[in-house]
Image (cartoon, rainbow, N blue to C red):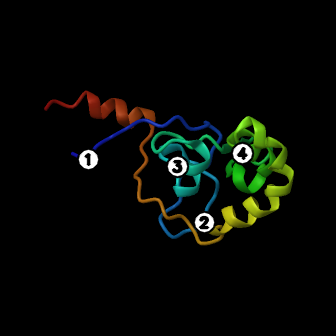
Amino acid sequence: MKPQFVIHIQPQAAPKPASGMPCNGCGVCCLSAPCPLGMLLSHRRSGACAVLRWDDATRQYRCGAVTDTVAVLRQCLPRGLRWLAPAGAPWLGRLARRWIAVGRGCDSSLEVTGPAEVESDRQLPS
């Protein structure tokens, strides 16, 4: 049996695309673990990325390092350096698009099951 873990996804989020298909903003990859850039910005190596943003208007998850760079830098920089956020935002945005491979397609190999499927797996006899 494959290891299972639970991630909490917005109900309006699109289902995860197949690996290699265009990203649809489902959020599965970033909600399961931060990428290397997310680790640096989130100050964590596991769990959901702290810079991931949900956009109600488009019903998509997006990397805050790409879409909300000033706020992300203010969140991540030490208090005394937060004044640098506006100057560093363009640099972070370019770097983030490259590091997360914007436009390259889904690279998550995770298999997603819904709550009903997880619950039925728990009820199967061992």
Q: Taking 57 as reference, is 24 left or right?
A: left
The amino acid beneath tag 1 is Lys
| Pick the front one: 15 or 94 | 94
Name the residue carrying label 4: 59
N-terminal of the pair, mark 4 or mark 1, is 1
Report how far apart the C-alphas of labels 2 and 4 lie in the structure.
23 Å
Residue depth check, mark 2 versus mark 4: number of the one nearer the observer: 2
CA neighbours of label 4 inside 10 A, class few (<14), some (14 to 19), many (20+)? some
Report how far apart the C-alphas of labels 2 and 1 lie in the structure.
29 Å
CA neighbours of label 1 inside 10 A, class few (<14), some (14 to 19), many (20+)? few
CA neighbours of label 2 inside 10 A, class few (<14), some (14 to 19), many (20+)? few
N-terminal of the pair, mark 2 or mark 1, is 1
Residue 9: give x, y in percent of width and height: 56, 38
Name the residue carrying label 2: 99
Q: Taking 25 as reference, is 4 left or right?
A: left
Residue 22 position by quadrant: bottom right
Name the residue carrying label 1: 2
Question: In the rendered image of this protein, does residue 62 appear above or below residue 5?
Answer: below
Q: Residue at x 73, y 59 (%)?
A: 92
Q: Residue at x 67, y 61 (%)?
A: 96
N-terminal of the pair, mark 2 or mark 4, is 4
The amino acid beneath tag 4 is Arg
Report how far apart the C-alphas of labels 1 and 3 lie in the structure.
21 Å
N-terminal of the pair, mark 4 or mark 3, is 3
Q: Quadrant of the C terminus?
A: top left
Name the residue carrying label 3: 34
The amino acid beneath tag 2 is Trp
Residue depth check, mark 1 versus mark 3: number of the one nearer the observer: 3
Q: Judging from the image, what secondary structure is the residue with disc 4 in?
A: loop
Report how far apart the C-alphas of labels 3 and 2 lie in the structure.
12 Å
| Pick the front one: 29 or 49 | 49
